Image (cartoon, rainbow, N blue to C red):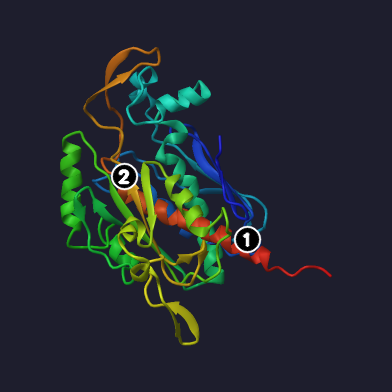
Amino acid sequence: MSSTFGHAFRIHTYGESHGGAVGVIIDGCPPRIPINREIIQAALDRRRPGQSDIVTPRKEADEAEILSGIQDGVTLGTPIAISVKNTDQRPGAYDEMAAKYRPSHADYTYDAKYGIRALSGGGRASARETIGRVAAAAIALQVLKQQYPALEILAWVKSIQHLVADVDPATVTAADIEGNIVRTGDPVMAPAMIDHIKAIRSEGNSVGGVIECVIRNCPAGLGEPIFDKLEADLAKAMLSIPATKGFEIGSGFAGTQLTGREHNDPFVMENGRVRTASNRSGGIQGGISNGEDIFFRIAFKPTATIMTNQQTVTSEGENTELQGKGRHDACVLPRAVPIVEAMATLVLVDHLLRQRTLHAPTAE
């Protein structure tokens, strides 16, 4: 199983949803980077379950335990291991799923690939696996901020099913996003989104939507053509998040309705710096960042587990029905916002370190 992400800054996540613990091993983090543990815990707190009345009620403190790689608050340059214990396990809620495949889950495909699967909570296919990613990104962000203190990575809920927020990527702030439990930057639309999620959940159903993300003050020159283009790695990172079904950057699919004259971003000089008059490229050209805001969107499907009867089959190939059980989000988007930010952070720090290697002096 491929559980490793990155090249220069590599992470390897481990653990199952209802196992003893989940976590991450980070390799390639530079030495002598001051690390604030509170930043790691704050990132995990944004992702954890039970944080509001529109997310799963599973109660987990998600307290990070740093096992290696950091001494007296400073990175050693050696592998960093972070572990988070699973304390609110209820495997009994999944007894029926041991013999029945949950529709649109990974139950059948894991069986088809490995001939065995974790029966409780989806195992590695659960969004609980993303704890390791978020913890690693909290380290990565502190590496990035040392080099580029003005860099910002912000994600927000753009839409919940048919409800669309009005958010300006150029001006939205972290306070705007965290000012409501649905994590949209539009305070006017937030109440309607919250009410819609609650109504859908009361029906035993689920909804999806779109998350947008902006990366501000990213330096020009990051990206590794041809196959490791910056937008290609961002796409892979985003589509590795559970429940994602689509990715577009800049003008995205809407750009197909424009001509080249309409779509091109003219270059201009501004305060001695090369800029673009528009940003339909989404901050990346030729697979390399151009210094403009990087802007992209990710589509999330409705949560697969719903509390109504669905047609399915057993592991023995018999037709049957299954009603969802356990504790699940009726809409994953509010808790997916910090995961999107985390994956964007991991891509950026990896490309920053690869760029440093590219320009490192050679011995004569």
Residue 182 visible to the viewer = no
Q: At x 50% / y 46%, what residue is drawn?
A: 132
Compared with 315, 120 (above or below) is below
Residue 218 visible to the viewer = yes
Q: At x 43% / y 51%, what residue is drawn?
A: 44
Circle 1 or circle 2, nearest the eye: 1
24 with respect to 266 (left or right) = right
Give whichever of discs 1 and 2 has the lower sequence position.
2
Instruction: Name the residue type under label 1.
Output: Arg
Comparing 43 with 100, the one in front is 100
Q: Where in the figure is residue 282, as x and y percent of width and height?
A: 40, 65
- SS of the residue at dot 1? helix
Q: Residues within 10 Å of mark 1 (few under 14, many from 20)?
A: some
Q: Residues within 10 Å of mark 2 (few under 14, many from 20)?
A: many
Q: Which residue is mark 2?
A: 332
Q: At x 15% / y 53%, what residue is drawn?
A: 192
- SS of the residue at dot 2? loop
In the picture as drawn, the residue positioned furthest to the right comes out as: 364
Instruction: Please identify the quadrant where the C terminus is shown.
Output: bottom right
340 with respect to 221 (left or right) = left
Compared with 336, 320 (above or below) is above
336 with respect to 186 (left or right) = right
Instruction: Name the residue type under label 2.
Output: Val
Residue 315 position by quadrant: top left
Q: Where in the figure is residue 104, as x and y percent of width and height?
A: 34, 31
Q: At x 50% / y 26%, what residue is drawn?
A: 113
Comparing 303 with 181, the one in front is 303
Instruction: Please identify the quadrant where the N terminus is shown.
Output: top right
**Label at residue 354:** 1
Residue 13 position by quadrant: top right
Comparing 63 with 242, the one in front is 242
Q: Where in the figure is residue 25, as x and y percent of width and height?
A: 59, 46
